[in-house]
Image (cartoon, rainbow, N blue to C red):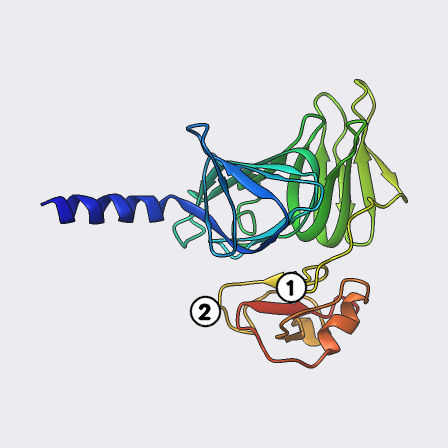
Amino acid sequence: MLALISAAFAGNAYAQSAARVDFASGSVIAIGQDGRSRALDKGAEVATGDRIETASAGRAQLRFTDGAFVSLQPNTTFEVREYHFTGRTDGSERGVFGLLRGAFRTVTGLIGRVNRNTYQVQTPTATVGIRGTGGVIALLEDGTLRVTGTSGTWSINKPNQKQLDVPAGTIGEASPTPGEDPVETTEEPILAPPQPEERQIAGVEKFPPAWGRNELPGGGAGGRKREISLPHAPEHEPDAGLCKRPGLPDPGIRCRLLAA
């Protein structure tokens, strides 16, 4: 009987897992809903309600169960406020995250891809919505929210102000000053240099391995995306260059030739 109870508890704990740590360096901790903190190392689980904090030399990359990647930068506080994904985009999926300080690079997964209102990044200044798949979201020291689009289109929603769309190749920001609309800018956020073990996620989209190469709609010659699998991609190269790089395929990654 005790074994059955333990197995049921373990299964429930696993079901509540939102993400797994792909890699971590420096000081990275998670604080659970019970207020207890724990160090995060490679392979550790991240659950709904966890707050993750990176120190000045800390960074971590999270792989969520819907296929999303989040690469946390140093001096960042990131929260998994709500997360639900059963493997289907049936409207029950939901991902609500909080950014209290710092920055992260991200490529979104299946949450928000079909039902866009199921994905949000909440900050003290404004809320970031999704009509896109890749970007950098940063909260500056003065409270300014800055969003850099690398693929698709993001949106910045500030209470009682106009919504700003941030397409790929543009940068938008929202000031913490009340009454000011979000605006487009040319100032990029200053991020720490990527580590060798960090999977570079600028300009790439990641899907579960079961997705076929031709299941991504639209774009490219003949109305189809041209896609290729690749394991890593240096973020300083343009998107089209990423897709032309040879490499051992990772079945969980699909790269779009955005210049096509």
In the displayed structure image, the side of residue 226 where residue 207 appears, left or right: left
- Residue 177 screen position, x and y as percent: 81, 20
Instruction: Say which amino acid is labelled 1.
Output: Glu
* Residue 222 vertical placement versus 151 (above, below): below
Q: Residues within 10 Å of mark 2 (few under 14, many from 20)?
A: few
**Helix or strand or loop: what does disc 1 sit on?**
loop
- Return the x and y of residue 102 as percentages of the image width and height: 71, 38
- The residue under the point 78% across, 23% down is 176
- Of 160 and 19, which appears nearest the observer? 19
| Callout 1 crowding tier (Cα within 10 Å): few <14, some 14–19, many ≥20 | few
Q: Residue at x 67, y 60 (%)?
A: 201
Where residue 119 appears, x then y in whole percent?
56, 41
Give the vertical position of 230 relative to 74 (above or below): below
Q: Which mark is residue 108?
A: none
From the viewer's perspective, tell me whether residue 185 is left or right of residue 149: right
User: Image point 51% across, 72% down: which residue?
Assistant: 212
Report the label total: 2
Q: Quadrant of residue 260?
A: bottom right
Q: Which residue is mark 1?
A: 197
* Residue drawn where x is 61% and y is 75% of the image: 229
The amino acid type of the residue labelled 2 equals Ala
Mark 2 falls on what kind of element? loop
Going from N to C along the chain, the mark reached first, 2 or 1, is 1
Instruction: Name the quarter where the N terminus is drawn.
Output: top left
**Front position in the image: 29 or 252:** 29
Q: Which residue is mark 2?
A: 210
How much space separates mark 2 and mark 1, taking CA atoms? 25 Å
User: Is residue 85 shown left or right of residue 228?
Assistant: left
Depth check, front residue: 141 or 42: 42
Quick one: which residue is furthest to the left in this view?
Answer: 1
